[in-house]
Amino acid sequence: MNARAAIASPATRNVAIPERRGLWAALGHEWRVASLTVKLSALLLLLFYLFAAASPIIAPYDPAHQWRELPDCPPMRLHLAPRADWNQGYLCAWPMRLDVPLARHYAEDHSRRTFVRLFDRGHLFTTAPGDPPFFLMGSEGLGRDLFSRIVYGARVSMCIGLVGVAISFSLGIMVGAFSGLMGGMTDSAIMRLCEVEMSLPSFYFLLALAAVIPSGLSTTATFFLIVGIMAFISWAGFARVIRGMAASVRSAPYVEAARALGGSRARLLFRHVIPSVIGFAAVNASLSIPGYILGESALSLLGLGIQEPAASWGNLLSQAMDPQTVAYYPWVLAPGLFISAAVMAFNFLGDHLRDRFDPSNSG
Amino acid sequence: MRGRRFAFGAAAALIAAAIAGCRVNRPPNDHAATQTLYSATVSDPGTFNPILVTDSASGDAIGDLFESLVRVNPRTTLFEPGLAESWAFSDGDKTLTFHLRRGVKWSDGAPFTARDALFTMRVIYDPKIPNSSVSAMLIDGKPILASAPDDYTVVVRLPRPFAPILSSLQFSILPAHALATAYAAGRFNHTWGIDTPPDRLTALGPFLMTRYVPAQLLAYRRNPDFWMRDEHNGRLPRLKGEVRLIVPDQNAQYLQFQSGMTDVYRPRPEEVWPLEQAESKLNITVRKVGIDTGSLFFAFNRNPRHYVRQGATDPRYKWFTDVNFMRALAHAVDKRGMIDLCYRGLAVPAVSDVSPENKIYHNPNLKDYEYDLKLAARLLDEAGYRMIRPGVRGDPDGHPLVFNLTTNAGVPVRDQMCAIFKQDLQSLGITVNYRPLDFITLVKALESSFDWDCVLIGFTGGIEPNDASDFLRSSGNLHIWDPAEPKPATAWEAQIDRLMEAGTTVMDPYQRAPYYWQIQQILHDQLPIIETVRQVTYIAYRNTLENYEPTVWGFYHPEWIEFRAE
Amino acid sequence: MLRFLLRRILIMIPLIIGITFISFAAMSLIPGNFVANLALDPKISPQVLKQMEAEFGLDQPLMLRYARWLWGIAHLRLGVSLAYRVDVAHLIGPRVLNTVILALSSMALSWALAIPIGIVVAVRQNSILDRALSFLSFLGMSVPAFFLAFLAIDFALWSGWFPIGQTMSPDYASLDFWSRIADRVDHLILPTLVLGLAGVASLMRLMRSQILEIKNADYVRTARAKGLPESVVLYKHVLRNALNPFVTMAGYSLADLLGGAALVESVMNLQGLGLLLLNAVMKRDVPLVMGSVLMGTVLLLIGNLLADLALVAVDPRVDFTTLEAQ
């Protein structure tokens, strides 16, 4: 054991496992040492997952409710209500009126107010049932509240990236590292399998799948199916990259030595090879999250994605993406901001974790 | 740092490349000077052989190259002389004699004669040549017999008087001298494919094709020998050439029109307003063309093959064949909402399956089902479909009302229309599971597996009402709610069959119309389908274009279009 | 090495047969064949559809159709497209050159930008420059490439500097040789920028992390301890070792780029393969799809083989015995 410890790979040598403390204490320590960017990222992700977990509370309205007289309505301005009206709510906004329907031009209707009530009827904020709605981020083409749709969309989009990446990357790392470590016929066979997987037209399989999914399947079930498929499609390329890196580690002195000492394959794999590629893999994984979030919307073309009236950030964004919309209704790009923010948060956090747990940086 | 220098080098190279880009001279807009009309189309043609055409892109690509015996006047929707100067019925409307135009030449100099017409009909009737003209040319399953007493006379004999005959004979005439050899050798199906050099296409229409660059453009030049003359005996067409850019993306087409690359553009509803604002800046005119000629409707599956499994009948069969249920649903379709939200107000409610643009055959007397959710709820209650739980309505037997809705995937407008329908039914306590399917999967569900409940689907429409017989007749394959019924399933379907049959025997369009009006009335009352809305189409074109008169049925006098000299 | 090459090339044949067979079989899982495109056309009767099915051989069993297709491939015939009724080679041919040029130029652009930028930001980790470029790259990653394409042609309209889509001017045929080249290059700039920039962001991040990883590795410290100048350490020790995963990625990214840009192609009208193939799949044009699957497979296999060779050349720690030891 001592001999092995002495020649352990640099990656395992001094992994920063703090002395045993409570989980909260450990987290508190991590929080103190983190930079401001990292703190912000963590808070942002926390907020987005809160969106997902508590959507019915945070969203002011039912995300499918259509105010058909208010399509593509711009975000409304929030005011402090006049003191006399504080019994109705402290905040209020002018309702919007569709002025030129063909152009979808709106004007504020100053003849009345709509009061924004906090902690009302199980919502963080909302308006009274008969009142005109308050659109924090405007409305989309069918007059549905964009903010509510974004909040509910977080359920899909915040999960799809993480779950998809988890599946495809764990598969990719295991297969790739094993293949690179083994070399020879095993390596050759696994790599040829990867090539088969990579050259199959995935689009085809998706089409076939779209046809066999029973039409009554729930949105959630469809969602998990999509995540699974997307992950399964993309592991092979990653496995190849990891295998190349593993092949390079294979001949490193510490691995040779460990092998000579009779380390089992599993031990070699988990103690030496995987740690040496995990940093790259982590960065690569956090980089592929946006691909999942955006890619999900492309599946809608095949009838496989999240379907109306359910929302996802990818869908909301792709519906907004034409020059016409961007020029006249820029607020419908808001889901894009959420995607960017989530992507950044994931990546900064990923970078930070890599730096924290990569021993070569601690020296 | 060498790395930094590297990066700066790369950036500099990029900027240099960009500057080099600006220095390539853009060709000026000389469309008017060269009398060449630039337009855009969405996809590549599939064939240049007019008889083998099955897609609209190919039809558009070679539409100006060929002619048929008769033409349709898009303003009156009546027939006009084409390659046939005149025609006459005789023998109790069972014989039709065409007198062909003399002096018409093919682009290789050969004269156009009756032989060409007979050859084309032979090709169409050939069972080895799959084509879209043949089904209209079979009368009760029997072919039309044609003969040519001389080079400029074609005599057509029908098994019985058949009113749609002129419409059936609207196929493009092929050059017999150019294609007879290939046809005799059995190579017709692979003749005049898109790999044929365009100058080898022997044509006689107003334009001849000069160039086809796949995924880029189609170019045409004027046919100097075209037979038509204007009122001053001047040569037609007046344009010297045409270029059609192949641009699959609508947004790109829109930008290209704004930049002056193309001279005409069919805007989507949301583009009409910005273009109208820019009329003077871009020197263009935005004009209303008309109401869409097709029909977009919710169809409900009434096919027992879908519902009866192992002796048990699915309750949905009862709902969809219950006219009271269907009337309630018809009152729940928010056509105004669909028009305002999906078409920016540029659409009209559709009441009948025939567009109002089909001036003769459209029934103007139908009264639409008003959008009224309260009325719909009352109708459902009265018919025994009551609320069984909060938010859930059940049928008289207590089954909750749940069904699947589909359409073809990737069409945002249809997604929106379905979302509107779904939301309204939800408020009535009816749950709709919506999932669009890719087109071919959808087609398979509609016509062979019959595994669907409700579909939002569109059919294109033509002037001749008998063209819809496959849809309207109970035996038809496109009788979408129950295809190819062995015998009419209901009395009203039998009635439609009889009216369709009778409608083909009356020759005068105005006397025929009442038969088809009655059919529209029956569909409106029985509701196997619920009509939605029809888009109002617009066109934008440069002000320098003269005689530019688009209609929903095509251009009025397209040969007269020209650029004004400046 | 020769043995290695020979074995890899020989194994391609069964691989290609296997891949194409699986693809072919997958298509029979999808409901509907090509003639279903026409089934809703009231002018085309079911009899005509049956005739077409027979003419195209779509009514025959899967194995027979596959065997026929394979027989054609053995004779270098890709078959006749169902939708276009011409040889598949005729359809793919004119588009291949465009696509390859565009794929190569955009790849060159993204690599030429990503690698040096990645190095710079890694060397100056946590500086303002690093943060700013990170921010930009994450923003870039959250924008789908087709939207960049919209912005690009919108920019072209607004500035008038670039052509709006297309790969050539309408009067291309009347230009002389040099103007033709200039015209092509002119039309290539924006698409190259769009596709190239779309790839920069993540490549640059990966490069950065690789350099950071290796910068402090033992052998790099050793090199530094030997007193070698930092730039030599960086290029000789760090960069060579850092390139490993990128070499592998380059191997398959060409095959990816060939078919993966359908939406950008559609927006910028690039006359490429992506859109043709997307439509072919949607229309169930089997010979056209199979032609492209075959082409994609060959490209991928060759790309991967070249990548493995390059890996040996670039990464001092990898050799043929590692890759193929018995």
Image (cartoon, coloured by chain):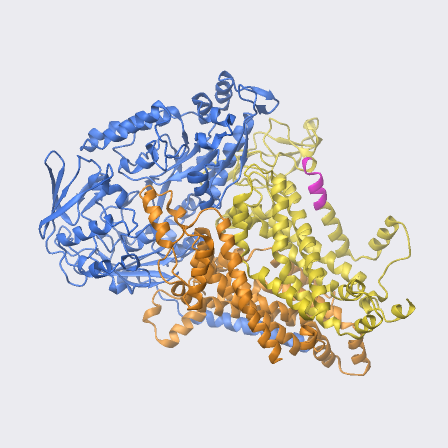
Figure colour of chain B: blue
Q: Residue furthest left?
A: B150
Residue in the image at 60% along x and 25% along y:
B391
Magenta segment includes A352: no
Q: Is residue C227 above or below residue B242?
A: below
Q: Is residue B507 left or right of residue B467?
A: left
Tell me which corner region of the image, top left, top right, bottom left or bottom right, holds residue A346: bottom right
Chain letter matching colour yellow: A
Quadrant of the rendered structure where residue B262 is?
bottom left
Q: Position of residue C271 (x, y in %)?
A: 43, 62
Identify whether C170 is placed above or below B493: below
Reply above or below: B146 against B404: below
Quarter placement of the N terminus of chain A: bottom right
Q: Is residue B439 left or right of residue B100?
A: right
Figure label count: 0
Residue drawn at 43 percent across, 64 percent down: C71
The boundaries of the magenta stretch are A48-56
* Residue C196: image location, x then y, percent: 55, 65
Question: Majority secondary structure of the magenta segment?
Answer: helix
Specify the quadrant that holds the C terminus of chain A: bottom right
Q: Is residue C266 left or right of residue A358?
A: left
In the image, the chain rendered in orange is: C
Q: Is residue B472 visible?
A: yes
